[in-house]
Image (cartoon, rainbow, N blue to C red):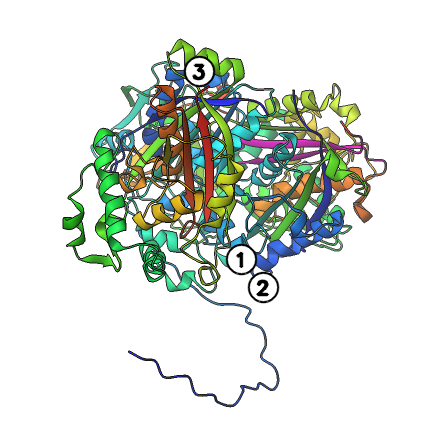
Amino acid sequence: MSIPPTPAGPALEFDPPLSPVMRIDCPVRLDYTIAAGREQSRFLRAMSRGHLLGRRCPECRKVYLPPRGTCPRCGVMTAEDVEVQPRGTITTWCVTNVPYEGQVLELPYVTASVLLDGADLPFYFLIQGLPADQIRMGMRVEAEWADTLGPTLDSIRCFRPSGEPDADPASYAEHV
Amino acid sequence: MSREPCAVIGVGQTRHASRRKDVSIPGLVREAALRALDDAGLTFADIDAVVLGKAPDTFEGVVMPELFLASALGAAGKPMMRVHTAGSVGGSTAIVAAHLIQAGVHERVLTVAFEKQSESDAMWALSPRIPFQPTLVAGAGGYFAPLVRSYIQRAGAPPHIGVEVAVKDRLHALRNPYAHLHMEGIDRAMVEASPMLWDPIRYLETCPSSDGACAMVLASERAARGAARPAWVRGTAMRSEPTMFAGRDAVNPRAGQDCAQALYREAGIDDPRRQLDTAEIYVPFSWFEPMWLENLGLADEGQGWRMTDEGATALGGRFPVNASGGVLSSNPIGASGMLRFAEAALQVRGMAGEHQVDGARNALGHAYGGGSQFFAMWIVSEERP
Amino acid sequence: MVDVAIVAFAQRPSVRNAVGDEVELVQPVIQQALEDAGLRASELGFVCSGSCDYLIGRPFSFVTALDAVGAWPPLCESHVEMDGAFAFYEAWVRLQHGDVDTALVYAFGRSSLGSLPIILSQQLDPYTVAPLFPDAISLAALQARALLDGGRATERDFAEVACRSRRAAEGNPNAQLRQSADVEALLGAACLRPPLRVHDCPPISDGACAMVLATGERARAIASARGRAPAWVAGVDHRIDPQDLGSRDLTRAPSAKLAAERAGAHRAPLDLAELHAPFSPQELILREAMGLGPQVAINPSGGALAANPMMVAGLTRVGEAALRIHDGRAGRALAHATSGPCLQQNLVCVLEAR
């Protein structure tokens, strides 16, 4: 196929001169199939049956929940299942007041670092059931499970105060 | 040891702003790079290698942008590297560049760091929706607020310390023409009246989100001959630790302590509180000033807030911190760490202009990233090692 | 310069859709490399890794991967958003300071989670080229077409590279594609992106590898205790070309040529070269650029055509070359890594037994 030559037209003139291009929109969509790792998959499957399954490090004996595949401190694969209780102690917390893209929770909301009984690492959960200004370190909370359980963290709707007396500060001192 | 001396002979940065709509990404990095080259009296042709740093590629939506920026930074036919160590990246990028000189591989290295967050959405870039993972934590503030709360409790610090830092750094920024935030009339009442975003962190106690870049020309002793006022690199250090493990102290992380001690050792500093004159410390939330002063060994544990409270860290105080206005006044994330390193160099070169610390001879540049787990630091001096 | 050698190398078999997250992918190879060198993480003088966030569509993937190392007490550690071969380079530079004598380098990549050819299109100029989404296979096809149109190669040459690579991979248990029909049969297949056929393109691979470097006496001690020759780094260099596809002669790789010269590739004869050429025509371009004649065995491992885990495949070339020095199969070897569209950036390393 031969391409005809472009006809020579009059030179383009702009009066006033064109302003520079300050912005172009280039939407990019990339789709990913995210795969949970082996250990995370075990954890999620247990969660869909209403259990919290942590993993113990064979070297330092600490229990990780959710499991991270390895003990990040020792650099070895965690190797032993440990059932962790759906209640624990608040070690620290945060009230979020700032809207952001992808936000699903109504503002303001409280998230807390909860040290679950039987685990050695606190984990973030949504806290409900009391005003934000009454949350404190050492407060005891328990999980409220969702109506339908599945292989997702949404199986726990939130944590609520359990009514137990506050935990002894020594029990969570190294997590503050 | 066979370490060659390394000097900073050129420093450049852009005007930082929330949206630099007037330039493209290549335009932004060239603005900083050309200023650094001008300062060094060099051109791209004189440069042996380019080391580029920035935070996650999702911030601009360009995969490995050093590839398309090679021409804009005069790197064609030269070695080019791209460093990414989370928030500490600006610092570690400068260190990788310095190591090329110190190893005797190159004579003149251009190092550049940037972020142009306005071309994407930083909150989205930091908190993508991943299936089966919680989306509870909104951006960096949601992660760091609990650490601040822990610090306040441990140190017994009065609540106004965060406010004081926020005011002090913005007052410093009024003396820095490149700073993003120029808040005339900033005072404690203004900060206290700003909304509580992530309790206990108020809006004006957080860093802005900026477009900006920073660049430095690093040179060997031979190449630095004849350079006006070089800043000599006396020591560099990097340390990393895992994000979380049982028993980790994320408020006063050991990686930061170890990094500082290794740095002082390499720089031949026995008493940093006496021998350092000023520091540029990565403080994205105001409370991190006292927290890092303690972590760096510049204050006793639990006492860092007293330095702030006494005014020691303000310009004119006995140990000015972030005379440039710091991250609280300009935060092009990938470049923020390099700005700390570059501002430290400007101080010991006596070229910091209105925010010059009188008689600064030894200065610390500090950067951190991730969950307070990646640290990069250097000490620069007017005196050759 | 300080003498640096590769003393241990470990890799996992490349597969599509590997089971496991980044940590589970990379921890076994790190552990294997460290055990093989008789080191614990806490003894390491330096650690450096290479990876790319966009492969898994999440920022800070290298942060999670650090969980696999056991970085406690804290380590002197760095990361490049590049192929692991460039992390190897950073580690080599760090060891030149002489104050530390060991380094760990690792790389990981999961190319199977997203659409790799499209993800790579986002490496291009974001204003004028990336919005057109030119995928990586199409760009390699442009390069191949230019090679054919210039009369410098034929489609048969491409097929011969592919056939030889996949057959060489039969001896490599970590390779993903390990057999090939003969050249005639390959040429009978339809084109994927003309003039490229499926056999000219790499597989989609997930993988990880790890390497231990040591200096001088330390390297000799580690290697001799394991009955292997240290793979000494005789030279290493890397260079980048402009990206703009319209202003480049896509049939040449000037940065590869320059890097090979600077690395001293031809100071003595080479026994073999491990080239990171994901598409078969790229091997021809690289051989010409680096002046590799018929006496140099190319890609005895099968190369990137047999397994191409992104961010890992370049470091794997260095590792495969080192393994052949370790056991005496080669006395002098060249390893190469590439990055960017159409061989834009190239690293060359020369390894020697002494």
Q: Indicate which label's residue lies in the foreground, 3 or 1.
A: 3
Q: Residues within 10 Å of mark 2 (few under 14, many from 20)?
A: some
- Tell me the SS state at disc 1: helix
Q: Point out the stretch of residues depicted in magenta.
A: B359-383
- Tell me the SS state at disc 3: loop
Q: Position of residue B153 (x, y in %)?
A: 59, 28
Label 2 marks a residue whose chain is B
Which residue sits at x=26%, y=58%? C195
> In 3D space, how far apart are the residues under numbered discs 2 and 3 (Cα atoms)?
50 Å
Which residue is tagged 1?
Answer: B118
> In 3D space, how far apart are the residues under numbered discs 3 and 1 (Cα atoms)?
43 Å
Quarter of the image with the N terminus of chain A in it = bottom left
Pointer 2 and pointer 3 on the same chain: no
> In 3D space, how far apart are the residues under numbered discs 1 and 2 (Cα atoms)?
8 Å
Which residue is tagged 2?
Answer: B21
* Residue C37 seen in the figure: yes
- Tell me the SS state at disc 2: loop
Q: Amino acid at mark 1?
A: Ser
Label 1 marks a residue whose chain is B
Pointer 3 and pointer 1 on the same chain: no
Q: Amino acid at mark 3?
A: Arg
Which residue is tagged 3?
Answer: C40
Left or right? Give the position of B374 relative to A69: right
Q: Residue furthest bottom?
A: A10
Sequence-first tag of 1 and 2: 2
Q: Amino acid at mark 2?
A: Lys
